[in-house]
Each structure stands twice: as structure tokens, then as C-alpha cells.
Image (spheres, grey):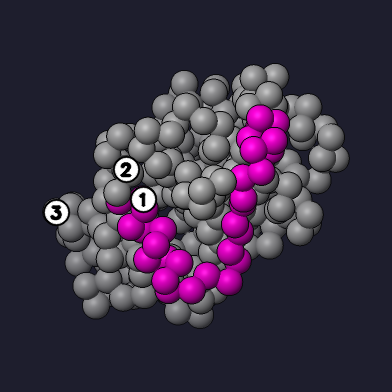
Amino acid sequence: MLQISRKYFALPFHHVYFQDKKYDSRFDPKLIRYTHLLKPTRQLQGQKTVHIHLQKEEKILLNSLSTHFRKGIQEIQENSWNVVIVDKVMDQEIHDFIQFYNSNRKRDKRRKLNRFDMQTLKLLREKGGLLISRLMDDRNETICYRAYVINGEMAMSLYDCNIEGRVEDFGNAFLIWENIKYFRRLGYKIYDFGDIKEESQLEHLKENYGGTIETVFSGVISKSFISNMLLQFRWWRGMKGPIYE
């Protein structure tokens, strides 16, 4: 489990990732947001995602990729492009990532990352729960970025973005594959593709990366009248979770 805490409109707010057992805290916050709980709960909504089980041999994981993706990844490997993985993230790297994301998000009609999102990344960083990776071509141009929530056992894709006009490359697939290998070497158990909104995207990921379609549980639990009002009047917009499109 990974947890970050902050104030939201003066209300104590916890964000809990990957919880796999009963939540235990001496202080009961008025607002709790859960992301990708592994066990079912009646208070949260189930959703589908794709998990890659990283304890398998690398050869098995590679063979799980579609032939099309393996070929594309091999082509990029031959280009000697550079993968940068940062697990000790500095403020400047967070700012660079957000600037890249917001500059290239329009193609996929994604919302702009705001100050709340930046604070989330920094709080995750303080807990050792943030990793940022990017792919750079032979001209040192950044092709794509990925940001992950990590806890030593699970790595969940939080945000991803490609440079506009370069989606025809297999850059994102190559970066995902290199990240999968990286987490596997560190002893992680699960690579989680994050929030997936469309059934077609689930099938696309499973077909091309292998893995299994799993049900996880996410949502916000409110424990006070004021926090309920905040939710009902849609003052919660800045707290919408990671969007995988």
C-alpha cells in the first residue's frame, strides 16, 4: 500500500494506492480516495485494467508481445534511442514532464494537468512512490513520457504522452517494454496499465502486451456532510484521477 495525505478545502484528505488489506489508521480522514485496490469493496466501483505479472522469465514476457509489437520494438532498438528512467525525481523533472504532457495532450483530448496534479506528483515523490521515464531519439528529442506510481511491488501507469506527430513510431511500446524489464529486475510483481476507459483499449493492451484483464476498485469515500457537499457540487474536479486514453 502507498498513501499520500494533504488538506483539501481544510479537510484532511488521504489518497491510498494498491491497498490489499483493511485500511488501518489512527486518524480517520473525512475524505479518502482509493486507487486500484486489489480486493473488492461495496463502497467502491470496480473497473478493468491489464496486469503484467513480472515474476515470469523475460523470454516469456517477450514472447507474450504481439509479433507486430516485437518487430516495432526491435526496429527502435536498432536506432539506438535512449531510455531515461528517473526514480529520484527532482522538481525540474516534474515541471518538464507536465509541460510536455500539457503541450501534447490535445491530440487525445485529455484534460490539462493542473496544480493539484503537480502536488500529487510531488507528494508521491516524497513517499518514494514516483518514477518518470522517457524515450529520446538520436537527436535527443523526447518522443514520449510515462509517469508511474510505485511501491516496490506494483508499478501503475499514472500518465503517458507522446509527442504530437510521432505516434506512428513504436516509441511508446518500446518505452513500456523497457520499463517492464526495469521493474522486473527490481523484483516488482505487477505492472499495472492504470485507468483504462474503453473496452477496445483493454483488448488492445492484452493482445499486444499479453497479461491478464483484472478488476480493481477505485473511488472516493466521504465521511462528513461538508465533504459530501463538495463532491455533489463538483468542486472535486481538480481531484479526478489519472486518465489512461
Q: Earlier in the sequence, mark 3 or mark 2?
A: 2
Judged from the image, the secondary structure of the residue bearing numbered disc 2 is loop
Q: Return the residue nearer the eye: 192 or 83.
A: 83
In x, y percent, where is residue 156?
A: 56, 50
Residues marked 1 and 2 touching at CB (< 8 Å):
yes
Please report the residue visible at 63 percent of the width from the left and 27 percent of the height from the top.
72
Magenta span: 73-102
**Residue at the farthest left position:** 233
Q: Which residue is mark 2?
A: 105
* Amino acid on which the number 3 mark rests in the picture: Phe
Cα–Cα gap, marks 3 and 1: 28 Å
For discs 3 and 1, the disc positioned in front in the rendered view: 1
Q: Is residue 218 left or right of residue 119?
A: right
Q: Is residue 206 above or below residue 99?
A: above
| Residue marked by disc 1 | 101
Mark 3 / mark 1, whichever is N-terminal: 1
Query: Identity of the amino acid at label 1?
Result: Tyr
